[in-house]
Amino acid sequence: MRARTKSPKAGFTAVEVVISALLLALLSRALVETSGSMSRLATAGNTETLLHDQGERAMRSIVTDLKQSGFASVGVREYPYVFEASDVQEQFAAHAHVPAQSHGEPDDADHGPSREIVFLLPADADGDKRPDYDLVDGVQWSGNEISYVVVTAADGQNYLERRTNGAAPRRIASGVERVLFDTPATCGYEIPLNCVRARVFLRCTDDEGHVIRHEKIVTVNLRNG
């Protein structure tokens, strides 16, 4: 007579079930953390891209203007003139304004007052898009003073503005925390003569509360350089 053998029980033991549940819980947690990390990276990346775009806009406008400008003396005024909003010479008083708020810490490069600029563009009386020129005096300058300043708007953000004669502000870029314009004399002749250097510091906070910074710098050779 053949002896019967017992077949193993189907299903899982209690220990196997517990181990499987723990493994599934760990895997789910890892997936959630990975998804959160990817979301944060995407948010930071989008914010940085936006800051980069705003920096490009700011620099395009600044470079286009400065390339047409030049070092000039008109009466008692010397152009370009660089200044801080709270410390403006009397002859440039029209360009004084409330200084922009600084959102950074004292050790941050984008913290502190801006050094802004006033300059002239060439006259173009006949509208041919070429500077008016005199054989004796050279380039004829327009009577309008162009300035770039940083201001804090009602929404708490800092904006770079382009102004004409201290008025008619036009927003150039948002998220501009600070600008620093330099002539050769103001920076110890670190830049060539007849040049102006512009540094634009951008700053904003993403949806996760992380501070994103971006900086642009350019040195422009002026028309009479």
Image (cartoon, rainbow, N blue to C red):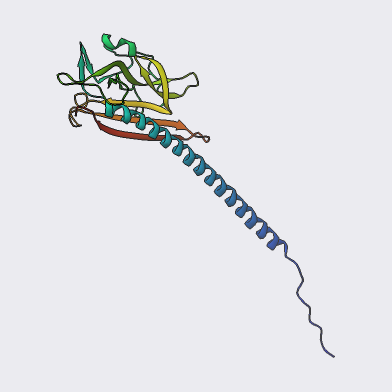
Q: Position of residue 159 (x, y in %)?
A: 42, 24
Residue 49: name its quadrant. Answer: top left
Residue at screen point 21% across, 24% down:
186
Q: Is residue 58 above or below residue 82?
A: below
Question: Please, which residue is most extreme toward the right here?
Answer: 1
Give the number of callouts: 0
The residue lying at 31 percent from left, 10 percent from top is: 93
Left or right: residue 45 versus residue 64 is right
Does residue 116 sit above or below 3 in this rendering?
Answer: above
Q: Position of residue 30 (x, y in %)?
A: 57, 51
The percent coordinates of residue 37 (x first, y second) are 52, 45
The part of the image, by quadrant, that contains residue 4 is bottom right
Quadrant of the snapshot with the C terminus: top left
**75 or 28, which is in the foreground?**
75
Q: Is 152 positioned to the left or the right of 220 in the image?
A: right
Q: Residue furthest top?
A: 90
User: Is residue 206 positioned above or below 16 on the image?
Assistant: above
In the rendered image, the vertical position of residue 57 relative to residue 186, given as above or below: below
**Left or right of 100: which side holds 79?**
left
Taking the view exactly as shown, the residue that stands out farthest to the left is 136
- The image quadrant where one finds the N terminus is bottom right
What residue is at 34 percent from the left and 34 percent from the top? 216
Q: Give 157 or 140, whichever is nearer the viewer.
A: 140
| Image location (x, y in percent) of residue 179 | 34, 26
Q: As rendered, which of 200 and 7 lies closer to the eye?
A: 200
Residue 150 seen by the camera: yes
Q: Is residue 108 visible?
A: no
